Image (spheres, helix red, strand yellow):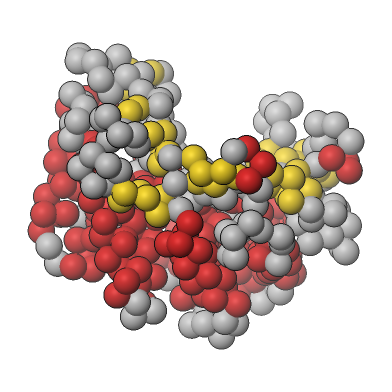
Amino acid sequence: MGLKDEFDQGVSHTLKIDFSKSQTNDSVSLFETTIRYLGGMLSAYELSGSKNTALLKQARTLGDKLLTAWPDPRQNLPFPQLDFGRNRPVFKKKISSAEILIAEAGTLILELGRLSHHTQDPKYLRQAVKAMQAIMNSRSTFPGLAGFSLAVQSQAVKNDFATWGGGADSYYEYLLKYGILIDNQDESYLNAWKLAVKSSKQHLIQVSPVRNLTYLASFSSEKGGIRYEFSHLGCFAGGNWLLGGKVLDDPSTFQYGLRLVETCMETVEFFPANRVIGYRELEFFDKNGFYIGIESYDLRPEVVESAFYAWRLTGDTRYQDFVWEAFKSLQKHCKAPASFAAISDVNSLPVKLIDDSESFLYAELFKVERFH
């Protein structure tokens, strides 16, 4: 990309960060710190030729901090919040009542696995595997569709909500990607993903009565059964199913993936801030086909990312054009004096910007836009 100076500047800054303590009194998120800080450092290390030993050392320092999420070696699931200063988890109430979302516990194995690979120390991967296996073996209403949250100590399901949306999404993403990464040497990951997809086709796939939009609903036997909603975060599933369908030679899943991508693309066209939609619930019902649950857009990448997968895996330039139009809309509606900002309501023009810019704008959305 010709950004060597910027890359070197970023690495230089990263090496100056003191991960031995937090700079505030706030707790540290295991999930966010793993996917953003650790994942970023390991990606930088690999993409620059796996030669920057100082960068790997810094990643290892952070990895050791993250392992404090498992204070008991017999423990499978980690605690979601950490105190970096005291090297221990943070509990809001009793330790026995601590819970973790399956996305928090199930989105560690790529980063911790690569850290083990590069350091030749299996302890990082070992903990991530324990967490994944605990989720995969947990009780579920439908085979493969894990409950939304688990008790850290007992591993009991605390919320049986089954969804591909936020709080669960990246667990399914990592099942597929880790299985691919290890070339299916441990078949349990791809098998778990295939089982989740099979159950989703049987129980969660819905088609709206207006415009025949295919989407993934959610389900909770404890809260009234099916919930006819689909979130922006859930739109990652289109690209995920396309990738899985291609790699596993599964035409049915691939076609469902395309239908999910089409739904996410079509819903965008309804709003004045064209191709800018946020973390909203898209509720499908007989009269309108869907309505907006949350009007804001916080620079999320999932819709564009799935369209990118569709273009790369089908060659249809219509998806490529969509990604480009999304970038132009981002430039038009989200540009701020410094970088880009979130939008409070995609229904209103001119848009009102929110003084906030999430890191996934740079780590995910810009990456997809750059390689489209």
Q: At 85% from the left edge and 52% from the top edge, which residue is drawn?
A: 153
Give whichever of 252, 34 is nearer the camera.
Answer: 252
Q: At 50% from the left edge and 63% from the top edge, which residue is drawn?
A: 199
Give whichever of 180, 35 is nearer the camera.
Answer: 180
Q: Is residue 317 visible?
A: yes
Q: Position of 280 compared to 130: left or right?
A: left
Give whichever of 143, 62 is nearer the camera.
Answer: 143
x, y percent for residue 257 = 31, 61
Give whichever of 125, 170 is nearer the camera.
Answer: 170
x, y percent for residue 15 = 56, 49
Q: In this view, does 316 lie above or below 322?
A: below
Q: Position of 109 compared to 330: left or right?
A: right
Q: Is residue 210 above or below residue 59?
A: above
x, y percent for residue 94 = 89, 36
Q: At 49% from the left edge and 71% from the top edge, which residue is drawn?
A: 194
Q: In which quarter of the image is residue 59?
A: bottom right
x, y percent for residue 241 = 37, 64
Q: Position of 115 compared to 82: left or right?
A: left
Total labels drawn: 0
- Quarter holding the N terminus? bottom left
What is the residue that sits farthest to the bottom in this orientation? 185
Q: Is residue 298 visible?
A: no
- Quarter holding the C terminus? bottom left
Q: At 40% from the left edge and 25% from the top edge, which residue is drawn?
A: 294
Q: In which quarter of the image is residue 80?
A: top right
